[in-house]
């Protein structure tokens, strides 16, 4: 077990001699992506021409598949196989070998028991996609429907404490709230949202004897591999899972789905490669989503703004058989000082598709409540919203009393206010016009936890000097390839072009994958450890090699730089050393484990959002005019990719505030929006002038490199800044997200 | 059904199921997998290709309707190792993350720049009778048929600007 | 998609004959609506007659001083046309507010008029829908999808027509030229092309089977200002939740009915000296919201009044 004390020492990363750390180098795989030659899972070249699989979905929410008539489909042109619950091959129980912290097993494919609308009940494989689709429409099912609980709002009374959880109480919230001179008690609602990754789930699978190779779109390599092995009832060593390019994940591809299971089963049955992709409609109904959350916020303050009492209670929902809690109150435990505190969660179980993690689970919904409530309280108190937050800035973690590892929230707010021109905000709503538009400014704070999980990485150097980093890690657009190349090159003192990075292969040393914004820190720390081990191995190789100019030197004194290995002014190129002394190359692994004493610190990333919006008084339409964010997230590895992650997150906040919602039809349990014309993610025209900056920071309690995650911080609080700006623009305080024209117009005088 | 067209400058002849869309013909029959399928219903723009110089959604166009057309896909843009200026600008400005919408964004950009050069107006054009000036707002509106869930919009705008978007 | 055959006619006569000859045959123009629906098997033609290359792609001046838009002119072509932009700005704006650049490059004038509803339950084939399957019932009635009609809805269907372009054409008093299988041609006002749902929502237009639209004819531009404004849930690439076209005191509303809704009551009120707000109030008096789509009352009243005000309609009274 490592200790944070070990992490404070200087390293090649902190020394950053060649300046690669932090540099905005182009994406490692960028050329492939701009030329369209990065093969995504459905596009991988199989060893022989593949057959095409198509899924059929249930039109009922709960019940049983009573019978199925597959005769017409079987007789249709080109059809190779038709499966229903009655003839799908047996599948093993799954989930046992999965790390429950970051991964989840998929459900059996084509179960007769239907647990939600859109669950897959049939599968057709044919020689062409056209034939497969046409045949799929010919399968006839009979169902035995059962009554289903579909509506969150109707079942709020049935909400239970999530298993194994308790409310967190500090002091006596109720008493403090009762005696507070200034009080706020409001409920905020965030809607059900869909990930809407641009690449639908897809798998290409083939068998070679007893071994199966699958290329699939998944964020977690090991989880997918083990799940599939269990399903197929074969050892994991017989499953090779590859996921090299992933067209967006956002948490929605943290687990595998029926495309993986059925492609592998069908490829075995047919002795031919099979590929299967979800349709866009299936992405909505048959993957996970972010659940709706009802959040009651109670704030009790002194007249000077000091909070005495603070409570955030969140009620959310999940699928009956797939427990998941959107922890919308957790972030608030470390945000503002208040001696009397209450936070907790309640869960409603429904017969709808499974809820699950979606970009910044918890914060993304949760901060929409408190950061709006703070704006409301500031107005009640006649204070500036930033001043109110400064008044409640804690010295130590307000719940646990632990020291913060780093906390630059105040600077994020003050720096942002200055750069954005916050002083131009008129605190009285509805005062500023630009043509027909009502214009307003709003801000919100951002906080998102930082995590480190165990991971490994392997690195080898070949006789030509090429250094190859290998890791069972994924890059879902986050920039993992690029930052691992930078870390490896800087650690070994070689030019970036000398480093290759290979990811997304279950044969490689395992990493937990992409999620919870732990990816860069976790995978990067393991890559750094592997690089340090390679330095050690090469130092020993050189100092022990009579033909090396370093022969006989103390390995501890060896330095790396400019592609050379050196002691003082004696040096030789790495490739010369390896070609001579280890012509077969040198391979080492490295690993990272979380430090036990890291838990002695309250560890987060922080930020502040500033938004300017226009509200159209004729239609209630809201348009973003300007948005700016300031963030503190440890050492930044790549200025370009980190910025893309952060602004991408902020834009998710815009979608959360203004556009994105789905609704469950109370009669059928289906989503109203089932495609990208019905579910509105932000389009280009929705995003006006939007930018961000990072504050200098190194968090030496986070990991050996002092870095933290940035992938989820950008969305935390962003939507609240926009809602606050809408209020400032037009005086409409809407606590039910998103702020659609319908709701804004209703609130306008 | 026999269909032939010019694909990235080369003659291509196919025997097609009339149901095959241009997108599936490219991806499944012709092995050009750069054009992406994000929705298959005209709702995302990932499948954008250029037909006779104009951008369209390949997913809603039946391949057999393209007899004698000149089709350009993402694979037809670079000259050997030299990237097309729009591709180079996307790389330089980090105008993508996962890269799935990217071929569509790039083809759409090329089509959009041609439309602007031809003087076409957009919804945000204030004076419909004036010459086209590609402001930021114009570029954003004209590129709105290409969704990017990674939300690389600010970077895409910067890439288009740097690739000569200021017409 | 169900299997179908495909043909490309050389001229209109051949196209009409091809459709007449094959039961289940349909015209295919840009395909952006028909192919979309065929993929979901909501449309199941057995034969497609591709009209997109017919010589109907011209925009021509008419003797009366108007414009004739050939049926296969693309939406992009019409919106980019100098004469359209100068004389029919509301039409250019309406087209440019619809769909995306890519879609408008394929979408045609005739196809746009004949596109089908975007009702969520029409698209979800697991739900009853009288439009897809006459007599099956209507899932939208009693449902929660709210982008539905407030004018002219029936007990069988409450869907809206999604076209932006058609709303501007309605306010511009356009005529639609139609050719029939036995050679006869006719022209009808745009307002008479689409029907209200009544008991037969699956019959959406007054076109007879096998009839083809050959052109849309714009009369000389009216005097007075023109505008098209569209409200929607994101800034671009989204269908309207309400829209308004005004052209020289003529008013049409979009996303409120099974057809582009010509606001005759508003027009009459304006002619009688009403203010923009009063004129819209007169129109909205006959609206019948259903509890889910009530927001459209305030939306249309305000948006309509704003458009009338900007175009100066109702000013001179
Ligand atoms: C994602 C998306 C978003 C969209 N957003 C909008 C929007 O915001 N606003 C808007 O107005 N529209 C929108 N559209 C719809 C689009 O405008 C229509 O799909 C398009 O205009 C249809 O034209 P087309 O030529 O492609 O028609 P097709 O799909 O080829 O045909 C449509 C129908 O017309 C018939 N037809 C075609 N030509 C003729 C003819 N000459 N005579 C008789 N019948 C004919 C066909 O048989 C078919 O029934 C959107 C579409 C998509 C996919
Ligand atoms: S409103 Fe019309 S289109 Fe929608 S479900 Fe009812 S019948 Fe079908
Ligand atoms: S795949 Fe064609 S628009 Fe989405
Ligand atoms: S880069 Fe991922 S969707 Fe655009």
Image: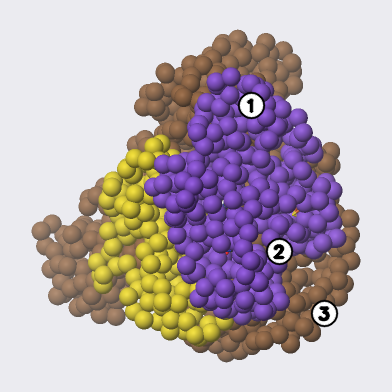
Chain colours: A brown, B yellow, C purple
Residue at label 2?
A: C208
Secondary-structure class at tag 3: strand
Tag in front: 1 or 3: 1
Q: What subunit carries mark 1?
A: C
Please give left or right for residue A643 compared with residue C271 in the image. left
Residue that appears at 39% across and 71% down = B71
Q: Quadrant of residue A619?
A: top right
Estimate the spatial distance between the alpha carbons at disc 3 and disc 2, rounded to whole Å.
38 Å
Q: Nearer the viewer, residue A400 or A556?
A: A400
Residue C194 visible somewhere in the drawing: yes
- Label 3 lies in what chain? A
A624 sits left or right of A700 in the view:
right
Viewer-proximal residue among C68 and A413: C68
Residue C287 found in image quarter: top right
Residue A562 lies, with reference to residue A713, above or below; the image says: below
Residue at label 3?
Answer: A69
- Rendering coords of residue A52 (x, y %): 60, 79
Residues flagged by tags 3 and 2 on a common chain: no
Circles 1 and 3 on the same subunit: no
Nearer-the-camera pick, A48 or A90: A48
Q: Residues within 10 Å of mark 1 (few under 14, many from 20)?
A: some
Number of the label disc, if any, that sits on residue C271:
1
Q: CA distance from mark 1 to mark 3?
A: 64 Å
**SS class, disc 2:** loop
State if disc 2 and disc 1 touch (CB < 8 Å). no
For label 3, being within 8 Å of ligand 2 is answered: no
**Residue C12 location (% of width, % of height):** 55, 70
Image: A386 above or below A544 = above
- Left-right relation of A608 to C142: left
Decide: few, some or many residues near mark 2? Use Cα within 10 Å; few <14, some 14-19, many ≥20: few
């Amino acid at each position: 077990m490592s200790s944070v004390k070990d992490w404070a020492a200087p390293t090649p990363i902190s020394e950053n001699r060649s300046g690669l750390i932090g540099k905005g180098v182009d994406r490692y795989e960028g050329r492939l992506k701009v030329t369209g030659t990065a093969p995504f899972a459905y596009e991988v070249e199989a060893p022989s021409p593949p057959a095409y699989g198509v899924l059929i979905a249930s039109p009922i929410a709960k019940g049983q598949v009573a019978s199925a008539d597959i005769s017409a489909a079987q007789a249709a042109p080109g059809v190779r196989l038709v499966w229903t619950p009655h003839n799908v091959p047996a599948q093993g129980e799954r989930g046992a070998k999965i790390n429950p912290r970051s991964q989840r097993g998929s459900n059996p494919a084509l179960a007769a028991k239907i647990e939600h609308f859109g669950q897959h009940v049939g599968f057709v494989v044919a020689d062409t996609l056209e034939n497969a689709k046409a045949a799929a429409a010919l399968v006839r099912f009979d169902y035995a429907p059962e009554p289903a609980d579909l509506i969150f709002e109707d079942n709020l009374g049935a909400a239970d404490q999530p298993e194994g959880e308790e409310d967190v109480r500090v002091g006596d919230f109720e008493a403090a709230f009762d005696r507070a001179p200034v009080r706020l008690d409001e409920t905020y609602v965030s809607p059900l949202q869909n990930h809407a990754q641009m690449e639908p789930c897809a798998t290409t699978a083939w068998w070679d004897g007893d071994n199966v190779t699958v290329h699939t779109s998944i964020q977690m390599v090991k989880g997918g591999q083990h799940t599939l092995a269990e399903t197929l009832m074969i050892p994991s060593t017989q499953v090779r899972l590859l996921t090299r390019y992933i067209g967006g994940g956002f948490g929605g591809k943290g687990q595998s789905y029926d495309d993986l299971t059925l492609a592998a089963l069908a490829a075995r049955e047919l002795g031919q490669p099979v590929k299967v992709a979800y349709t866009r409609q299936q992405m909505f109904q048959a993957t996970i989503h972010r659940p709706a959350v009802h959040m009651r916020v109670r704030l009790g303050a002194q007249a000077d703004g000091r909070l005495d009492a603070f409570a955030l209670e969140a009620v959310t929902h999940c699928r009956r058989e797939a427990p998941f809690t959107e922890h919308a109150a957790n972030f608030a435990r470390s945000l503002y000082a208040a001696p009397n505190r209450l936070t907790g969660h309640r869960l409603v179980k429904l017969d709808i598709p499974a809820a699950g993690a979606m970009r910044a689970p918890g914060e993304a919904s949760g901060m929409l409540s408190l950061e709006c409530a703070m704006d409301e309280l500031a107005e009640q108190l006649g204070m500036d919203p930033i001043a109110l937050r400064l008044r409640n800035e804690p010295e130590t973690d307000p719940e646990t009393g632990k020291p913060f590892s780093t906390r630059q929230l105040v600077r994020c707010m003050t720096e942002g206010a200055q750069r954005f021109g916050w002083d131009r905000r008129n605190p009285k709503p509805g005062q500023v016009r630009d043509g027909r538009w009502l214009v307003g400014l709003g801000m919100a704070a951002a906080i998102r936890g930082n995590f480190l999980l165990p991971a490994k990485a392997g690195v080898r150097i070949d006789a030509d000097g090429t250094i190859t980093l290998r890791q069972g890690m994924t890059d879902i657009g986050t920039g993992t390839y690029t930052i691992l190349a930078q870390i490896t090159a800087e650690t070994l003192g070689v030019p970036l072009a000398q480093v290759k990075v290979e990811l997304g292969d279950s044969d490689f040393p395992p990493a937990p994958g992409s999620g919870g914004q732990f990816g860069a820190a976790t995978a990067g720390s393991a890559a750094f450890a592997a690089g340090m081990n390679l330095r050690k191995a090469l130092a020993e190789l050189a100092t022990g090699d009579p033909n090396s100019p370093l022969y006989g030197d103390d390995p501890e004194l060896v330095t790396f730089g400019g592609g050379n290995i050196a002691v003082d002014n004696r040096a030789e190129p790495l490739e010369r050393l390896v070609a001579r002394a280890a012509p077969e190359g040198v391979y080492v692994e490295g690993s990272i484990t979380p430090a036990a004493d890291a838990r002695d610190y309250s560890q987060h990333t922080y930020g502040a959002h500033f938004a300017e919006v226009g509200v159209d008084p004729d239609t209630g339409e809201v348009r973003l005019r300007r948005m700016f964010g300031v963030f503190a997230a440890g050492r930044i590895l790549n200025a370009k990719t980190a910025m893309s992650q952060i602004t991408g997150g902020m834009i998710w906040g815009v979608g959360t505030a203004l556009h994105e919602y789905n609704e469950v039809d109370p009669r059928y349990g289906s989503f109203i929006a089932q495609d990208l014309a019905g579910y509105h993610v932000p389009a280009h025209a929705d995003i006006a002038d939007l930018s961000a900056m990072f504050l200098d920071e190194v968090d030496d309690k986070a990991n050996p490199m002092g870095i933290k995650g940035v992938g989820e911080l950008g969305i935390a609080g962003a939507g609240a800044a926009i809602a606050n700006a809408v209020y400032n623009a037009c005086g409409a305080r809407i606590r039910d997200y998103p702020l659609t024209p319908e709701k804004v117009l209703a609130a306008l005088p | 059904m026999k269909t032939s067209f010019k694909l990235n400058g080369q003659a291509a002849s196919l025997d097609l199921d009339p149901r095959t869309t241009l997108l599936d013909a490219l991806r499944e029959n012709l092995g050009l997998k750069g054009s992406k399928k994000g929705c298959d219903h005209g709702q995302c723009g990932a499948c954008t290709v250029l037909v006779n110089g104009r951008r369209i959604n390949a997913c809603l166009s039946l391949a057999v309707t393209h007899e004698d057309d000149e089709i350009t896909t993402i694979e037809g843009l670079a000259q050997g190792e030299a990237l097309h200026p729009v591709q180079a600008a996307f790389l330089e400005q980090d105008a993508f993350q996962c890269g799935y919408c990217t071929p569509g964004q790039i083809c759409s950009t090329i089509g959009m720049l041609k439309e602007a050069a031809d003087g076409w107006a957009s919804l945000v054009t204030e004076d419909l009778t004036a010459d086209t000036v590609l402001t930021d707002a114009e570029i954003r509106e004209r590129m709105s048929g290409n969704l990017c869930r990674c939300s690389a919009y600010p970077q895409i705008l910067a890439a288009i600007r740097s690739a000569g978007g200021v017409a | 998609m169900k299997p179908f055959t495909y043909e490309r006619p050389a001229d209109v006569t051949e196209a009409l004959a091809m459709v007449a000859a094959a039961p289940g045959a349909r015209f295919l123009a840009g395909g952006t609506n028909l192919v979309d629906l065929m993929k979901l098997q909501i449309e199941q033609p057995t034969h497609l007659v591709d009209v997109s290359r017919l010589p109907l792609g011209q925009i021509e001046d008419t003797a009366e001083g108007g414009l004739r838009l050939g049926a296969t002119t693309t939406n992009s072509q019409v919106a980019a046309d100098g004469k359209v932009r100068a004389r029919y700005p509301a039409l250019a704006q309406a087209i440019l507010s619809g769909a995306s650049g890519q879609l408008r490059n394929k979408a045609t004038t005739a196809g746009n008029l004949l596109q089908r509803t975007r009702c969520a339950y029409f698209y979800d084939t697991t739900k009853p829908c009288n439009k897809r399957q006459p007599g099956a019932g209507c899932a939208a009635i009693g449902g929660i999808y709210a982008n539905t009609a407030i004018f002219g809805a029936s007990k069988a269907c409450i869907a809206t027509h999604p076209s932006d372009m058609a709303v501007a054409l309605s306010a511009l008093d356009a005529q639609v030229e139609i050719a029939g299988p036995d050679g006869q041609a006719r022209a009808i006002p745009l307002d008479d092309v689409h029907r209200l749902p009544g008991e037969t929502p699956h019959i959406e237009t007054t076109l007879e089977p096998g009839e083809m639209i050959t052109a849309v004819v714009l009369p000389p531009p009216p005097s007075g200002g023109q505008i098209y404004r569209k409200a929607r849930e994101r800034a671009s690439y989204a269908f309207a939740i309400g829209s308004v076209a005004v052209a020289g005191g003529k008013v049409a509303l979009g996303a409120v009915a099974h057809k582009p809704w010509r606001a005759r009551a508003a027009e009459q009120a304006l002619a009688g000296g009403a203010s923009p707000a009063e004129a819209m109030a007169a129109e909205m008096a006959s609206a019948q919201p259903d509890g889910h789509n009530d927001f459209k009352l305030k939306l249309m009243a305000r948006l309509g009044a704003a458009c009338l005000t900007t175009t100066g309609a109702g000013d001179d009274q």
